Each structure stands twice: as C-alpha cells, then as structure tokens.
Image: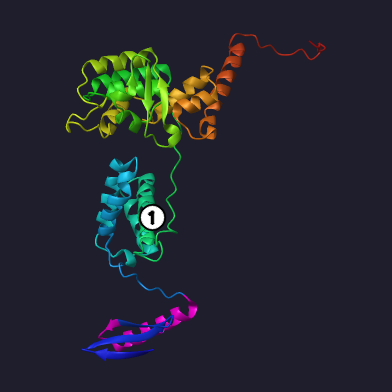
Amino acid sequence: MGIFQRHGQYYINYYYRGRRKREMVGPSKGAAIQALSIRRAETAQGKFKIMPKRGAMTFVGLADKYRELISVHKRGHNVEKYLLETLAASFGNHRVFDLSAEDGERFKAMRSKSVKPATVNRELTVAKHMLTKAVEWELILDNPFRKVRPLPVPKCAERVLDYEEEKKLLAACKQVRSRFLLPLVLLALHTGTRRGELLSLEWSRVDLDRRTIRIINAKSSAGDRIIPMNATVHTLLSDLFKNANTPLVFPSNRRPGEKLLDLKKGFKKAVQLSGIAHFRWHDMRHTFATRLVRAGVDIVSVQHLLGHSKITMTARYAHSLADAKMAAVSKLDLAGVCSSPDSNRPLTAI
C-alpha cells in the first residue's frame, strides 16, 4: 500500500483480495493519507466495498429502468408512475451507489411536511423495492434504505353510514357537477367493490342477463370474483349501458378511451354538502359489509363478496352482528319488560 502523486493529484495504491487497487483522492496529501488509513481499516475489518462497474447510474436512470422492467407489470402501474416521478424529482441525478440511509431519512422528513404519513410510506416502499432490484442488477452492493423505518400511521375509525346519512350523501352527489359520481357511490354501497375496481370496470365483465359483475385484476388474486347484482345495481347499469360508447363503464371525459383516474374532489365536496363527518370513500365498503352481516349473511359469503384473501380480514365485521343482537335485546328495556327482582321471592327453575 502507498501514496503517489501524478499531474498534481494524489493517488492511493493498495491490494484487496490479491488484486491491486488504485484510487484518485485529490490535490491534498493529507486527504490521501486519511483515505489510505480508511481503506486499511476497512480491509482489516472486512467492511471494504468495491463499487460495481455500473454503479455510476443515477436515481433517475434507475427509475426509468424500474418503470420499464418492473412497474409496467404491476396492477397499479398507473398510480405507481406518479410515485416514481416524485422519487425521481427528490433524488434526481444522485448516483445510486452514493445513497445512504441518511438520504432515506431526509426524504422521509421532507415529504412528511407536505403529505400524509401513509403517502410517505408508499413512496418509501417503492424506493426500497427499486434499490432491492438495483442490488439484483449488480448496480449496488446492498440496499441503503433497507433499515429506514416507515412512519407511524394514525388509525382511522371505520365509519358506517346509516340509511338517513345515505340519503343525504346521495342527494349531495346530485348537486355536484360530476358525471359518474352518483352511480359510482351507489355501486360502492351496493357491491362493496373498491374504488380502483369500479374505475377500471369494463362492459365485457358486466352480464346484465345473468345479473353479475366480474372483478378481475383486483388488489390480490383472491380479489378476482363474481358479484351478483341486486335490483338497484341492475337498473343503474342497464341505464348506463344504453348510452355506452366505450369498453369502459366509467370513461374519462377529458381523455377519450381512458378510465377516470379519481373522484376525490367531487366526492369530498359531496361529503361536505351532506354534513357527514369523517367519511371516506373506503367507508362505503365497510358499510356494505356491515349491512350484510347485520342482515344475517355468513362471514364466508361476505369474505367472497369483498374479495378478501383471509377470513381474518372479514372477521372484524362480526362485531356488527354482536352489536345488532345487543340492540335487539336492549329493546326489552325500552318496552318496559325489565323489572327489579324481588329479593324476598324465591327463584324458580324453568
């Protein structure tokens, strides 16, 4: 090992695993001496890292490669492309090999100032997977974000609409200038389908004669399912079909041939007009499941209708049946059936 100078620049010279290595440090001899000491320590402790030949790829370059080879095959690639754009804008032309856990923590802190923790965690998950693929592609030696922990996400209480609230919500939807808001809300309440499943629904999966809706490419493989139509859903889809001119049930008004991307603004406005507090789109799925359980539908059937992969995901709705039973028994109190027991009267076995 040693130090030498060439053309005003200092280099360090050492051996690693029997192979000679040279690195340019700069014009400072002191910096070269320090760099050589670090290399000696790393070699002795087995922590020495050699940058792969392709380690000069920037994060933007990695994002392009990931989008082309990985993201395009995901079910949610239309949404993930926006996450990739955010990540590329944040890390830009930083070399992937130079990224550290600190960079991941800085990204987490920066994004948490403008978006919700759940959004930060989704972006961080994609970044971690990108870097995992970078390791597989031999662009880097290990994943620097591997130990970056997600942000804690506050739990949101599941909200279930009562029928009076449903009337207010549907009336509010009629006041909002959004072509498909009302039919989408009705379908969500009567089928329990996720928002993404509804927005990507095609007429080829709607069988009006057999009164069924086929959901494919769902959130999980168990999510692929067939949902029967009730009278409300059948009438609604039959009316929509009369004016259908695209394969999509809910096509975009601005982008012909493409699906609606979202209805956040319209739905948010409708909720505000209805005066219903703390109500999210996904709560309509909770409302659907809870109403089924309270109507006496068994948990397994509810699981299949929701497309849950595990029965434990559906079991949380079982409390609705217990609440309904408690409410039924409590009606005896309201009817005046309850009376104080007479302590002097002996109990008689029935």
- Residue 41 belongs to the span the image colors magenta: yes
Quarter of the image for residue 32 reads: bottom left
Taking the magenta stretch, the answer to whether it contains residue 92 is no
Mark 1 nearby-residue class (10 Å; few <14, some 14–19, many ≥20): some
Against 236, residue 10 (above or below) is below
Residue 106, x across and y down, in percent: 35, 59
Quarter of the image containing the N terminus? bottom left
Does residue 61 lie above or below 290 as drawn? Answer: below
SS assignment at label 1: helix
Q: Percent x, y for residue 144?
A: 39, 62
* 163 shown above or below 269: above
Examine the rendered structure and indicate whether residue 186 appears above or below residue 124: above
Residue 273 seen: no
Residue shown at 24% from the left, 62% from the top: 93
- The amino acid at mark 1 is Lys
| Residue 321 percent across, percent down from the top left | 55, 22
Task: Please tell me which residue lies in front, 98 or 213.
Answer: 213
Q: Give the camera-side residue of 175 and 29.
A: 29
Which residue, given by chain and number where applicable, does mark 1 sit on?
128
The picture places residue 16, in percent across and down from the top left corner, at 41, 81
The residue at the point 43 percent across, 36 percent down is 221
Left or right placement of residue 52 versus residue 27 in this view: right
Q: Residue at x 32, y 19 (%)?
A: 170
State the image quarter where residue 148 is shown.
bottom left
Magenta residues, start to end: 24-46
Secondary structure that dominates the magenta span: helix
* Camera sees residue 339: yes
Task: Report whether 160 appears left or right of 346.
Answer: left
